[in-house]
Image: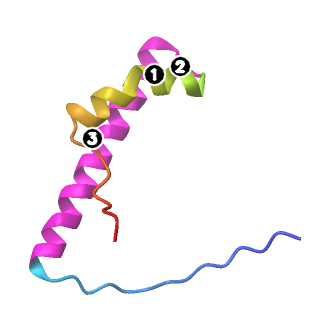
Amino acid sequence: MLVTVTAKIKIKPTAPQAEALLHTVSAYRVGCHYISSVVFNGKVLNQRSLHELTYQNLRTVYGLRSQMRNR
């Protein structure tokens, strides 16, 4: 049996955290629009092909890269 657990939480970021979060959400949204245009205009539906076409641009042009650091 598959069980889905959902939690509704309220976050209270500091001003710098809120700014960073807004920047991240904005970059993500722009990146999604870019990928959507590649899919729509190029009719690219294969996940691997789409990855190969978009990955480098998402990281360099749109600045979407992991900010995770080893702890």
Q: Is residue 26 left or right of residue 46?
A: left
Check if residue 30 falls in the magenta segment.
yes
Label 1 amino acid? Glu
Residue at point 33%, 30% (across, down): 34
The quadrant the C terminus occupies is: bottom left
Label 3 amino acid? Val
Which segment is the magenta one? 16-45
Give the structural element (helix, strand or loop) at label 1. Answer: helix
Residue matched to label 1? 52
Q: Is residue 19 left or right of residue 4?
A: left
Dominant secondary structure (helix, strand or loop) of the stretch shown in magenta: helix
Cα distance, mark 2 to mark 3?
20 Å
Considering every residue shown, the one lying at the far left of the view is 15
Q: Is residue 8 left or right of residue 4?
A: left
Residue matched to label 2? 49
Q: Which mark is residue 4?
A: none
Q: Are marks 2 and 3 in contact (CB under 8 Å)?
A: no
18 is higher (above) or lower (below) than 48: below
List x then y, in percent, for residue 52: 45, 22
Q: Are marks 1 and 2 in contact (CB under 8 Å)?
A: yes
36 is higher (above) or lower (below) than 1: above
Label 2 amino acid? Ser
Check if residue 53 falls in the magenta segment.
no
Q: Which mark is residue 30?
A: 3
List x then y, in percent, for residue 17: 17, 74
25 is higher (above) or lower (below) than 53: below
